[in-house]
Amino acid sequence: MSKKVFVGLSGGVDSSVTVALLKEQGYDVTGVYMKNWSQDLPGFECPWKQDFQDAKRVAVQLGIPFKMYDFESQYRQKVVDYMVEGYKAGRTPNPDIMCNQEIKFKIFMETALADGADMVATGHYARVKEGKLLTANDDNKDQTYFLYRVTEAALRKTLFPLGDYTKPEVRELAKKYNLATANKKESMGICFVGKVGIKEFLLHELGKQFPGDIIDQNGLVLGKHDGAIFYTIGQRHGLGVGAGLPYYVVGKDMSSNEVYVTTNLEDERLWNSQLKLTDVHWINTQPKDGMQVQVRTRHRAKLVDGTLHVAYTQQKGGGNTLQVALFDDIRALTPGQSAVLYSNEIVLGGGIII
């Protein structure tokens, strides 16, 4: 008897091809649309209805059962509130990573298994082998950065059929299968809202912010910002100050509502040779102290070699931190973002930058 696989069918080309491939491989496939967000924002219409219809169309085309799971309340609590609170505290959190940890590979998986599934699948560009997470064949599309907080137990019940393909190959497969989503564009903006940018979303959630000073490396006030929460370390565009040389954000103080900038690309506040992580998650076993690793500090950033120091230090308010000594300095480490640790093609885990 073939295994029952519930596929997260989002209405995009990647998840559509995932269904077609699994069906071709002989799995008993059910498509599931996860309704995580349906709220329109001023000037932006949430695309969920269109995505739902596209997902349903593909399910009908491929002759598979189709259902919808409503995770809006969990999504609001676990992903949206987490993100908003992070920004309020001066961090730059990543909602895609939290969505994978809390929704797709936790609540969705638990719901699907209780609903009769043996396994789940998604259209992520990644590979899984014996409970280990491996990078995708297509370096350009590899999405393991967003998946590092998934557990080994979840990975053992997960299929990633696109991990062996490149994006152009997936597009070709979509045309070969004549899928309704074959020519659908990639979704942009925040993972759950559609085309809206993070600034617009935060303004909707938190209202207008108090302006404050933008201060350069010499202590001079250059102008005013429209809310410190909107600025991130290393940011160059959208500052609205200075003529000639570009300015880079090197820090911010949420209590004094100040944003600090520099024109000096060599400013020590922009570069780090030490990586400090909190809320550390290992997918399999904890690596040994002194292990050589590769580090990625944002999606598609180049990998940087480093040495792991697993000597944890106690943090204020509980929790532990982990240190990684880097062979090369990394520019613009951003508190709240994730750093993901690799050993060649294997994803070890990672943590939140502090």
Image (cartoon, rainbow, N blue to C red):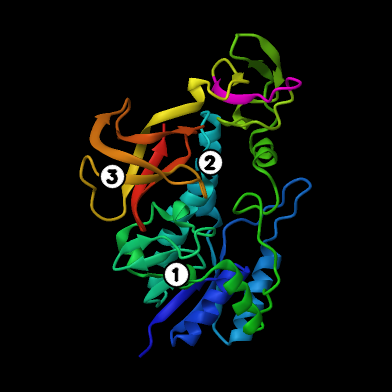
Disc 2, SS: helix
Marker count (numbered): 3
Query: What residue do we see at 70% from left, 40% from top?
Result: 200
Query: What residue do we see at 52% from left, 52% from top?
Result: 75
Disc 3, SS: strand
Query: What residue do we see at 60% from left, 79% from top?
Result: 173
Q: The residue under label 2 is which amino acid type? A: Met
Viewer-nearest of discs 3 and 2 = 3
Measuring from the top left, give residue 320's x and y in whole percent: 29, 34
Q: Taking 218 as reference, is 11 above or below it? A: below
Label 1: how many Cα within 10 Å (few below 14, some 14–19, many 20+): many
What residue is shown with label 2? 83
What residue is shown with label 3? 292
Q: The residue under label 3 is which amino acid type? A: Gln
Disc 1, SS: loop
Q: Which residues are magenta?
A: 241-254
Q: Is residue 276 visible?
A: yes
